[in-house]
Image: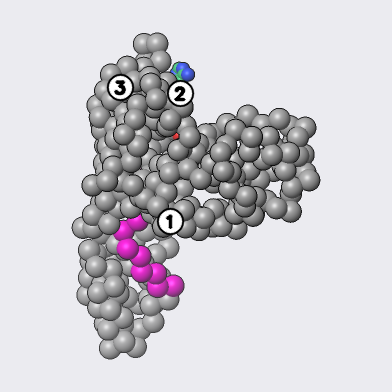
Amino acid sequence: MDTAIRVDGLRKRYGDYEAVRGISFEVARGEVFALLGRNGAGKTTTVEVLAGFGRPDSGTVRVLGHDPVADRARVRRRTGIMLQEAGFFPDLTVAQTVASWREFVTDPRPDVLALTGLEHRSGTKVRQLSGGEKRRLDLALALLGRPEVLFLDEPTAGMDPEARRATWNLVAELADAGTTVLLTTHYLEEAQRLAGHLAIMDGGEIVAGGGMAETLAGRAGRVAFEPPDGVRPEDLPLPATAEGPMLVVRAADPDVAAQTLLGWAGERGVRLRGLEVRSATLEELFLDLAGSAAEEAR
Ligand SMILES: Nc1ncnc2c1ncn2[C@@H]1O[C@H](COP(=O)(O)OP(=O)(O)OP(=O)(O)O)[C@@H](O)[C@H]1O
């Protein structure tokens, strides 16, 4: 594998508290890798170490083959960073902000405001931008230097659904063009759409991870429908449980289960109202893991 990011046994503490407890993972070039986990899991700490803002207490990290602290200048030139809290000058306009950053970049990309849908806000002062627009400006700045590796820490937090989707498309295009992206997010749909690989952190450790498809494979999907009049769950051809107002069948292949149910319903002239068929989602995996972590803590 052509590795862009390598983390090996990384540990990082704040005083007595160990926020990252010996994690290892690799990200291939041109891949989107999602680092997921509850608040306080250690994601931002990991990204900050990779971005060269802090040294590992033990373990090693490499970005494009370099130590991000010892080779800071070299790594910075080839990476773009969007952290959770961007420091802007509130009285500069969007265009002035971009212009001031361009000075630090050789061969800056000219189209970053168009890419992030901010062209119409060029003349607006940063203090007047909405939270989601500030995230977009931060992303625009991260893209100025045509980075080979992009660190995106909760990039779409606060964005409206349209801006979020536009950002997903942009990230996917960047990855298609060869950019490596390390993404943290609390939007599991975002991770599921964008990332080829993922790691789920909890309490500073990686508790699940691997390829997105493999991680979700073998987990049950679900078929849900409103209970048909006069039908008891035990009459159905597949075991179903009541979840709120719906009956739910869990199955490794939900499409096949739905066909079985529809065939059964067709033969009896019964309608399956509100039918929903869904593959396993990352959200379900995440909630299962969070549930088992909470149980272990008890
Ligand atoms: N500068 C700091 N000093 C002390 N403790 C810190 C510091 N930064 C983070 N922590 C603690 O380290 C742990 C991991 O924090 P981190 O920000 O890496 O988590 P996270 O997974 O990014 O969370 P979130 O989803 O809320 O952004 C948390 O318990 C946090 O309180």
User: Is any part of residue 131 visible from this angle?
Assistant: no
- Report the mark closest to the observer, 1 or 3: 1
Magenta part of the protein: which range?
A: 274-286
Whereabouts is ligand 1, in terms of quadrant? Answer: top left
- The span from disc 2 to disc 3 (Cα, nearest Å) is 14 Å
Q: Is residue 291 above or below residue 282?
A: above
Give me the residue at 34% from left, 30% from top: 66
Q: Which residue is mark 3?
A: 11
Is 277 colored magenta in this rendering? yes
Q: Quadrant of the C terminus?
A: top left
Nearer to the camera, 106 or 203 = 106
Nearer to the camera, 95 or 256 = 95
As drawn, is 180 to the left or to the right of 90? left
Q: Is residue 81 above or below residue 122?
A: above
2 and 3 marks in contact (CB < 8 Å): no
The first of marks 1 and 3 along the sequence is 3
- Report the mark closest to the observer, 2 or 1: 1
Q: Which residue is mark 1?
A: 177
Which disc number belongs to residue 82? Answer: none
* Element on which disc 3 rests: strand
Amino acid type at image mark 3: Arg
- The span from disc 2 to disc 1 (Cα, nearest Å) is 27 Å
Is 31 colored magenta in this rendering? no
